[in-house]
Image (cartoon, grey):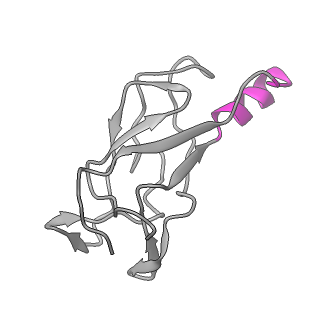
Amino acid sequence: MPGLETVMNAELICTTGGGTVKLITDPIMILVEGEIAGTIADGVADANIPAFDSCDVLGQCVPLTAVWVAGNPTVLMDGIPALAEISLCPCLAAVALAVVTGGADDVGPCIVIIADPNNFTVFV
């Protein structure tokens, strides 16, 4: 099984960030147990992923995300793969730092991870 489906207000963490934020899904109105389901397209900085409390790479968090990787390709929502709990969303903060400073070899990748898909127990 690919995993639990992730919905609006799922708790997110960043590998280089402080604190947690809540996922904001686009309102395609496909529901999982009465909650708006997420898709891999729900990875847009600020619109879907708010800024975290801090960033070990940039200091102040400025999310530079775009799309979730993996998802659940067996479940399509409006033609887009569902956002499974095992999905990752790369953030380009380390790349931005490398451009500004001329290199950031000691900085690892920034990845947003779904910490809690909202405690839903629905497998699809």
Q: Which residues are magenta?
A: 92-105
The overriding secondary structure of the stretch rendered in magenta is helix
Q: How far across and how far down the image is residue 36, in percent?
A: 23, 64
Who is closer to the viewer here, 124 or 93?
124
Q: Is residue 14 above or below residue 10?
A: above
Asked whether 100 falls inside the magenta stretch, the response is yes
Q: Quadrant of residue 100?
A: top right
At 43% from the left and 58% from the top, the residue drawn is 42
Residue 82, how many percent across, how many down? 41, 70
Q: Is residue 111 magenta?
A: no
In this view, the residue farthest toward the right is 102
Considering every residue shown, the one lying at the far front of the view is 1
Q: Quadrant of the N terminus?
A: bottom left
Question: Residue at position x 18%, y 63% from top?
Answer: 35
Q: Quadrant of residue 53?
A: top left
Which quadrant is the C terminus positioned in? bottom left
Q: Is residue 37 above or below residue 63?
A: below
| Position of residue 50 measured from the top left corner of the image (x, y, whole percent) | 39, 39
